[in-house]
Image: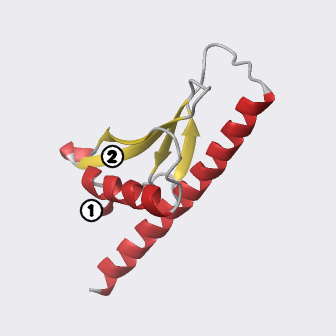
């Protein structure tokens, strides 16, 4: 689907950063193995003080109808102080807003596509 191209996702992430959360750490769009070599992407985030990799994924016909956030598993425990946990809480809140923003952009794109 066109709204999952790397270029489109990057433009949406850039728009989110400019309008919503310029301070959200380490957001990047990475290639995803699309069907038949499709130009698809995922949004990946790394939160400071936490080596957990986080991926925001678009819906697919076999998953939920909305964007989802996956926290990749860790092998080692992480011990943090209160300030670091507060920073992570802010970042996770911003992640939820980014996921909602991507859902809105996808829904808008599909509505325009079906209207034409």
Q: Quadrant of the C terminus?
A: bottom left
Q: Nearer the viewer, residue 18 or 104?
A: 18
* x 60%, y 51%: residue: 94
Task: Give the image quarter of residue 84.
Answer: top right
Where residue 53 sits: x, y (%)?
52, 30
Residue farthest to the right? 82
Q: Is residue 45 left or right of residue 28?
A: right
Q: Nearer the viewer, residue 9 or 37?
A: 9
Q: Which residue is mark 1?
A: 2
Residue farthest to the bottom? 115
Residue farthest to the left? 37
Q: Secondary structure at mark 2?
A: strand
Q: Earlier in the sequence, mark 1 or mark 2?
A: 1
Q: Nearer the viewer, residue 80 or 53?
A: 80
Is the residue marked by circle 1 packed among few (<14), some (14-19), or many (20+) residues within 10 Å?
some
Q: Secondary structure at mark 1?
A: helix
Give residue 41's mark. 2
Q: Is residue 76 above or below residue 114?
A: above
Q: Is residue 20 above or below residue 109?
A: above
Q: Nearer the viewer, residue 106 or 84?
A: 84
Where residue 49 sits: x, y (%)?
62, 26
* x 43%, y 59%: residue: 18
Total tally of numbered discs in the picture: 2
Where residue 107 sits: x, y (%)?
44, 71
Q: Quadrant of the N terminus?
A: bottom left
Give residue 70's mark. none
* x 69%, y 19%: residue: 78
């Amino acid at each position: 689907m066109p709204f999952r191209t790397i270029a489109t996702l990057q433009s949406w992430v850039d728009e989110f950063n400019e309008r919503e959360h310029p301070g959200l750490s380490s957001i990047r769009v990475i290639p995803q193995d699309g069907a038949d070599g499709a130009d698809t992407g995922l949004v990946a985030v790394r939160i400071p003080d936490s080596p957990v990799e986080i991926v925001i994924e678009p819906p697919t016909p076999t998953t939920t109808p909305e964007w989802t956030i996956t926290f990749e598993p860790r092998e080692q425990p992480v011990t943090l102080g209160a300030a670091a946990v507060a920073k992570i809480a802010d970042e996770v809140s911003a992640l939820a807003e980014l996921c909602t923003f991507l859902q809105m952009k996808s829904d808008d794109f599909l509505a325009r596509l079906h209207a034409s």
